[in-house]
Image (tube, coloured by chain):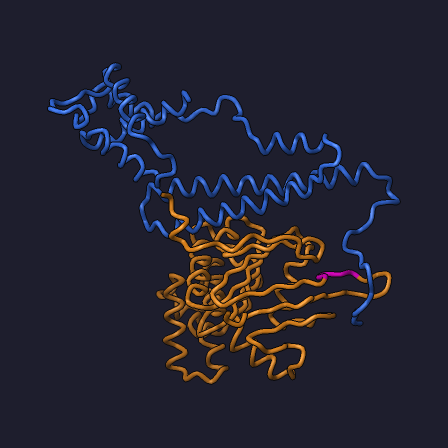
Amino acid sequence: MHTRYMSVKHGLLALLERAPMYGYQLRQEFEASTGSTWPLNVGQVYTTLSRLERDGLVEAQDSTEESQRVYAITDDGRVEVRSWFATPVRHESPRRDELAIKLALAVRTPGVDIAAVIQAQRAATIRTLQEYTRAREAAGDDLSWLLVADSLIFTAEAEIRWLDHCETRLARAQRSAKPPAERSSPVRARTTEGTRS
Amino acid sequence: MTAPVLELRAVSRVHGHDDSAVHALDAVSLTVAPGEFVAVMGPSGSGKSTLLTLAGGLDSPSSGDVIIDNVRLTGLTRSSLAGLRRRSIGYVFQSLNLIPSLTAVENVMLPRELDGVPARRARSEAIQVLDEMGLRELADRFPDDMSGGQQQRTAIARAVVGDRRLILADEPTGALDSHTGEDVLRLLRTRCDAGAAAVMVTHDARHAGWADRVVFLRDGRLIDETEPLGSPESLLPA
């Protein structure tokens, strides 16, 4: 939640660097820049704007209506945006990853076909990757959205590489658990029917 | 329903026999429709490249049928098989096989000329596809005067030139950086959108992401596949 507030806060400040805007406009611009990947509701935008105003990072310009108030970035706000861009994003503690937890528990749960769990996930993640790839191609040459789409694609790819790696690791663990006599080549023919010389 | 461009019916390929027989491919069935881009994934030794050589008529199955555009390959004479391969199938294999004494454009127009297309037309088709690959300026270079990536794109241009119905690609982006690799995948995609069918072997999930359907091979068997994608519009973020 905290991280989310931080990214919305800085996202809005960065947009206000370009020009003063009102809340609805900020929401539209935020979504346009990130390909609507992380939708914002107007309530979130106004809550964030009032915190930014309280902290002296933006100021509301004169307006007759509350919903049409135009916000402008202050000098302190500009300093804050510069500092945000200059500071690497920190991944402080590993986020909770349902898939890693699932596989970690699958190896310890009797009766679970872990190869099937891995394959089902691989097919699902590749399917997601196909969708991202297609959406990215359909979105033309909007650079911001291309970067966000690439990020989604590389994250999905990393998950699939990790699944491949898990599979190899499991196969090795299974081989070393068996006595040598039982090890066999999986591609050995079950039948010689149709064999050509 | 339109007839498939490629159909594998219970195709097996066995190397060796009796006790030492190895099933490189084991009763694989796969149908690829016009306009469809299929990616084949699986670990090394799972039969991916065998599937591709059988689909392209470069090797014969031990059992089962390979059918391209309603033609069963098993029944063909050697010369009609060669003709079908040249006219209907474009291959992008890991080895590029460019002819060193021919320029890029001559390499690309060669299969068309062999098919009896007049040189002038073959040349303009070749130039067009070289242009799509970003190689127009290099059309008159010899392979030795091109970088590895440029040679690879030339080989791909040769594979897709003309009106090939079926494009078979084995790790087609091998030596290319990720942006040039994307250009290659985009080109394959464009060809499929124009009605060709493509089968691409890849170990890279990001490349498979360009396909309409991904099939998974394991120990010579087709074990799983993704559902075909819907229209691009339905996938755009709301």
In the image, residue A147 lies at what x, y percent?
Answer: 38, 41
Quarter of the rendering occupied by the C terminus of chain B: top left
**Can you say whether B49 is above or below A161 in the image?**
below
Q: Residue at x 71, y 33 (%)?
A: A107
In the image, residue B116 lies at what x, y percent?
Answer: 47, 85
Q: Is residue B147 left or right of residue A161?
A: left
Q: Residue at x 86, y 42 (%)?
A: A180
Camera-side residue of B21 and B147: B21
Camera-side residue of A12 and B2: B2
**Can you say whether A5 is above or below B24 in the image?**
above
In the image, residue B23 lies at what x, y percent?
Answer: 75, 61
**Magenta region's main secondary structure?**
strand
Task: State the blue chain.
Answer: A
In the image, residue A47 lies at what x, y percent?
Answer: 29, 21
Which residues are the magenta region?
B22-26
Camera-side residue of A17 and B176: A17
Q: Residue at x 78, y 60 (%)?
A: B22
Task: State the orange chain.
Answer: B
Q: Is residue A145 left or right of residue B83?
A: left
User: Which corner quadrant of the image does residue A179 belong to?
Assistant: top right
Instruction: Count how many numbered circles sit on residues in the image.
Output: 0
